[in-house]
Image (cartoon, helix red, strand yellow):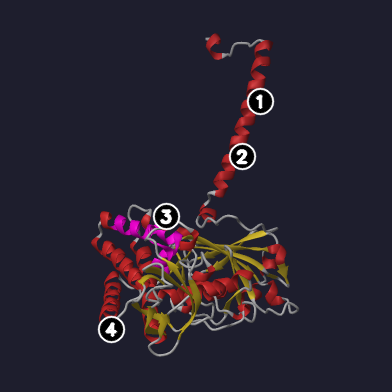
Amino acid sequence: MRLSTWPSRKSRSSETRVRPILIAASSSLAAICFFGCQNLWNSSPNSSSMPAPEPRPVYAASVKVYLQDDAKHEMFLGEFDRASCVNGFPQQWSYYFTSVVGQHRFDLDYAPLLDQKSGSGALVVKTAQQRYHLRIGTLPSTIVARQLCEETKEADTVKFAADAPEKDDLLSALRLAAPDCQFEYDGDKGLACRLQHPNSKELLTQLETLKKNMTTKWNHQPYLLIRRLTLAMQMLDALRRDSKADWQKSCRIVKYSLPNELPLSFRSKLWRDKVCNDSKPDDDTVLIGLDQAVRELQTLSRRIEEASLVGLFTLSVPRDQSASKDYWVSLQPIEIPLVMSEVPPQTMSCVWHPLFFEQPEQQLVAIDLVQVPHSDKSFCAPAPSLARAKREADIYVRSSIASEMEFQISNGQSKKLRLPTGDYRYSVSQFSGPFPDEMTSTQEIAPLSTGHISWKSARPHLVIKSW
């Protein structure tokens, strides 16, 4: 009995062998506990409800901002930098939210608004590679009155009641920069940008009306516009049929189409990844892209009727100057804005939209074609690339409503064209086949004739008689 009750005596040598093993095991256990606990802290409900996109801003003293509903449920909104406080108001803020294409972060800088010497008098918003200036005039009064810097001296979080007046002030900058978004709270996911859109039946009616107008009222239809209309109808038809095979076919056509053959919303890589890479795309996401495509087609069709002319292009070169029968003609709009007025870059209206923020020219086209609401308080920040984006946006609109910008023509023939009013450069080259590989010499590739045309008078007629 005594032998089973008391432990046997261990030798001193066995204790020597066991002690290093225990020390190593305790060290490993401490490391596992440290990193495991750190992961548990990072995966707490409040911190993981709205994970921030990378890279995150580096704040000296970050204070998390939450909204709290009546049931005391906390929703993560963003954070501010306590080290940027001026007179009790933090100047550096970050907001996090989701949209149909993923996660987004807006970094807000109130410093230029408070700096009288800068002269900008605007709140600066940065998201991804884009910057916007918001002319808000004054700081949000309810947030200033809260004295957040004093309130958070001993805390790293601050909470606002979801129904408190401060909520509107907190979201006012986001609503100005992204006027098409309805910012709502999506449970544990946090803040979300919701986009309104018609249902599939309403979109089908609008597309059929566009198709009828193009085929019955116009004697010459622009190729790019017809192509975009066809792609939109194919995708909507596949969505209504709910056929996986039809859907995959539509996505393949979109994938292998040229960029200018796609509606502006279909050119968004994030949107295409969402609707074509998922086994079952979300209907709302698809309909949002289709709604934007229909808006674009409607505006462009009106531009065709208002700002384009039907005329003839004739090639009539004497046989002694013409060594070939077939030629290739290319037209290029001269960079004189047609549909966008000349405005200094610092006063160019700019807004954010989840389908168009990837490229600055896409934003400008969407604004010009009234695809997104206009904001008279949100402007593009001046940048060297802005003027180029503006020109590219103008060329996109012009080429969209032109019947053909490149075409084959035989000597002695005429071709009917529908072009937006304006000035164009043209070049005439020898046509040796439909594929570049069939061009065998530099003489065949080099233009035989170049020049300028003015497509402004009623029933314009350009005739090339010599080179």
Who comes first in sequence, dot 1 or dot 4? 1
Local SS, label 1: helix
Which amino acid, mark 1?
A: Ile
Quick one: which residue is furthest to the bottom in this view? 458
124 vs 247: above or below: below
Q: Is residue 163 visible?
A: no
CB under 8 Å between discs 2 and 4: no
Report if residue 264 lies within the magenta region.
yes
In three-dimensional space, the C-alpha distance between marks 3 and 2, rounded to whole angstroms, equals 64 Å
Quarter-of-image position of residue 20:
top right
Q: Amino acid at mark 4?
A: Lys
Q: Residue furthest right?
A: 117
- Residue 23: numbered disc: 1
Please state if 326 lies on the left or on the right of 444 as rendered: left
The residue sitting at 64% across, 72% down in the picture is: 146
User: What residue span does the magenta drawing correspond to?
Assistant: 247-275
> How far across and how far down the image is residue 219, in percent?
29, 81
Task: Look at mark 3 in the image and give the residue it sits on.
Answer: 437
In three-dimensional space, the C-alpha distance between marks 3 and 4, rounded to whole angstroms, equals 40 Å
- Please state if 463 lies on the left or on the right of 200 as rendered: right
| Residue designated by label 2 | 34
Q: Secondary structure at mark 4?
A: helix
Q: Is residue 6 above or below residue 44?
A: above
Q: In the rendered image, which residue does mark 4 sit on?
A: 217
Q: CA distance from mark 3 to mark 1?
A: 73 Å
- Distance between mark 2 and mark 4 Cα atoms: 73 Å
Main secondary structure of the magenta stretch: helix
Q: Amino acid at mark 3?
A: Asp
Q: Nearer the viewer, residue 111 or 205?
A: 205
- Front tag of 3 and 2: 3
